[in-house]
Amino acid sequence: MRRLFFICNALDDATRLERKIVTDSPAASRKVFLLSRALRDAGVRAWVVSLGRGKQDGSGQLFRTKVSRVNGVAVIYLPFIHKRLISELFSLFFFIPVLWRLRRFSGKKTALFYNRLPAYLLALILARLLRYRTVLDLEDGATDLRGWTLTSMRARVFARFFDSLCSGGALLACEALAETTQLWPVQCCYGTTEISPKEGSRDSSILTVLLGGTVSQDTGAPLLVDAIRLLRKEAPPWAAQLRFEITGKGDSLNDFVELATASQQPTVIVHGRTNDDEYKQILSRTDIGLALKPIVGKYADTTFPSKVIEFASQYILVVTTDISDVRKVLSDGAVYLTVDNPQHLLDRLQWVVENQEKMDVLSQKAAHAVAAVCLPDVVGANLTDFLFASDNGRLA
């Protein structure tokens, strides 16, 4: 029996609300739970071991260790307290009794660590002592590894030390991340998803455009803010066919709230942070999904915009900046931005509005491309091979 322990900070909606956490990453949690489910379907006993934490509110409220299931996957949440320092100590030390108890299960064991976090360090050391295979899941490459500042030198030392404890290589969110680690072997994993064609026909008179996730400068939100302001200033006739909806949180959210309160076209609707059911409802009416991380931004080659997989899998037309491995995955099934310029974004949106007959063609191409690399059975088999291969390449 092969057993995987996914060390991370994934949160399901119920636990997030119970623990009053507002700083989680829904996309990261979704990816962890879906990958774990794909591995279970492939015959691996996958456990998610989560910090279950977020920013503390100072109240001192304590939440004890709990075990639950998310889509059939067993999840162990470490205790969390809304108190600084104590909260960090909980995260650092409470992995130890959990991993120690999990050692009693028979079979080959792999511990997969979601990014390099100091909170995982004792867990990583213990996993090595217990002779688990240890693998790094590198989803967000550090942006401070270059240079000779004290911060960058510390980051490099920590990254090398963390990697030195990983015996089984690294999963990468995109190919460029291979340059940020000396671990070997490496394998790219873009997540997993089911392909879900939309029901019914699209209303061609109004196209819903969605920007979701972290709404900030680093994710390109100001590009859309400037584009909407320009649209309202110039008021071209085609702009009346667009409606923009914004979900998530971030330092640019107030800019969209300001746009939403003005009674001008095109309409802007701001939802803020949503739960899973609310987000599914919004996706069901979305025609165009935006992924706007800047081409010249620090995250262009250090991560992969998982939103493009989510959009493509539901036959939502993807309009995205040409970054990371997006073109490799979606090929010609998306509308690409090649510069970080609001007028360029408007030109692409105008083309979509005026060529709606091509939307279905592009979205179908994207869905087929995503299916080739992200269907659960494909991902489950590939990850099992990678996570449990012995040194000679054979499954252990």
Image: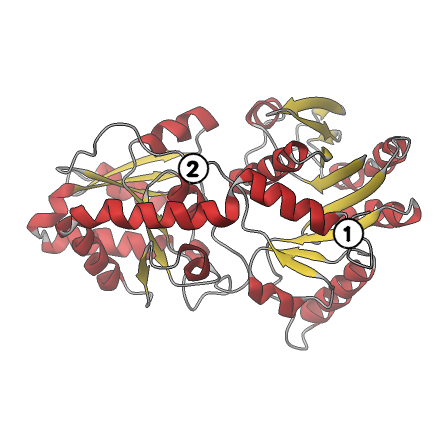
Asked whether the viewer can see residue 259, the reply is: yes
User: Horizontal and vertical percent for residue 219?
Assistant: 43, 54
Q: Disc 2 residue type? A: Ile
- Seen at 53% across and 42% down, the residue is 192
Q: Measure the alpha-carbon separation of dots 1 and 2.
A: 29 Å
Which residue is tagged 1? 389
Asked whether the viewer can see residue 215, the reply is: no
User: Horizontal and vertical percent for residue 348?
Assistant: 23, 58
Image check: 213 left or right of 340? right
| Residue at the left extreme, as displayed | 237
- Seen at 57% across and 44% down, the residue is 378
Q: Is residue 279 placed above or below 120 in the rendered structure? A: above
User: Horizontal and vertical percent for residue 18?
Assistant: 61, 22
Task: Name the colour scheme.
Answer: secondary structure
Image check: 367 left or right of 202? right
- Seen at 47% across and 36% down, the residue is 194
User: In which quarter of the view is residue 174 placed?
Assistant: bottom right
Q: Disc 1 residue type? A: Ala
User: In which quarter of the view is residue 155 placed?
Assistant: bottom right
Residues packed near mark 2 inside 10 Å, few (<14), some (14 to 19) or many (20 plus): some
